[in-house]
Image (spheres, rainbow, N blue to C red):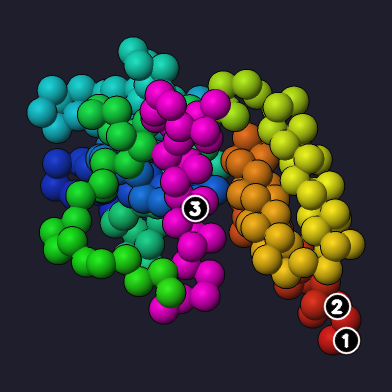
């Protein structure tokens, strides 16, 4: 893609929506000019243009909360960008995982209306815990301890699932499977592997069998 293809506004700017490549959570909305877009492509990390300071800024340059670029896409009108990233910490200056943490209308959670909504929400919470590291949270503890601890827990929970299944206990099995799923999501986050990639493998296998 040639940069002239992008339709910058009269001030030479284009809005850039930054999204977590794994959880799909929208992290922030910033602006890029031609130079910051070029630097983003060159360095592989997000650079933006500050409208208030009227200067380029490298996300995470002072905080360390950089954003490694996975992909940059543009919309059909070529006047907006979608930047998929792997964040190394909170995206928001407040210390929050996402700048879009507030809702205009606080609606009650409707997880039971969507069969897989809890998986999406859990993936988001795990991403928040990794970025924000709130003290006392179990997920924070796992990320602080690192890969070996996470792998140990995955192994332990897998063994518990086997035992529960051998015991023919549905009540025991559902709890152990829930624990295993949670720890697997933590592992995927630590490995920077999106759940969507796993689902894609399942889809490809299914389609292959249909042929």
Q: Earlier in the sequence, mark 2 or mark 3?
A: 3
Residue at 42 percent across and 39 percent down: it is 128
Indicate whether 139 appears above or below 170.
above
Q: Earlier in the sequence, mark 3 or mark 1?
A: 3
Residue under pointer 2: 208
* The one of 150 and 67 positioned closer to us in this rendering: 150
* The one of 188 and 16 positioned closer to us in this rendering: 188
Residue 175 percent location from the top left of the image: 65, 58
Residue span colored magenta: 113-141
* The one of 95 and 138 positioned closer to us in this rendering: 138
Label 3, secondary structure: give it. Answer: helix
Residue under pointer 1: 211
* The one of 131 and 58 positioned closer to us in this rendering: 131
Residue under pointer 3: 122
In magenta stretch: residue 121: yes
Residue 136 percent location from the top left of the image: 43, 26
In magenta stretch: residue 142: no
Label 1, secondary structure: give it. Answer: loop
Indicate whether 199 appears above or below 156.
below
Label 1 environment density (alpha carbons within 10 Å; few <14, some 14–19, many ≥20): few
Q: Residue furthest left?
A: 52
Label 2, secondary structure: give it. Answer: helix
């Amino acid at each position: 893609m040639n940069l002239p293809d992008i339709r910058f506004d009269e001030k030479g700017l284009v809005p850039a929506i930054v999204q977590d490549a794994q959880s799909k959570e929208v992290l922030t909305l910033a602006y890029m000019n031609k130079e910051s877009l070029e630097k983003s492509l060159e360095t592989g990390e997000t650079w933006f243009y500050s409208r208030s300071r009227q200067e380029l800024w490298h996300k995470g340059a002072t905080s360390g909360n950089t954003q490694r670029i996975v992909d940059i896409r543009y919309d059909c009108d070529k006047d907006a960008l979608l930047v998929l990233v792997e964040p190394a910490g909170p995206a928001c200056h407040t210390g929050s995982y996402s700048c879009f943490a507030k809702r205009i209308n606080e609606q009650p959670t409707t997880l039971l209306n969507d069969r897989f909504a809890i998986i999406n929400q859990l993936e988001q919470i795990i991403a928040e815990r990794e970025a924000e590291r709130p003290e006392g949270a179990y997920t924070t503890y796992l990320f602080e301890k690192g890969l070996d601890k996470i792998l140990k827990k995955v192994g332990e929970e897998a063994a518990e699932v086997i035992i529960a299944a051998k015991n023919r206990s549905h009540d025991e099995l559902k709890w152990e499977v829930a624990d295993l799923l949670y720890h697997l999501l933590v592992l995927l986050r630590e490995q920077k592997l999106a759940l969507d990639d796993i689902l894609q493998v399942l889809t490809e296998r299914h389609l292959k069998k249909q042929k």
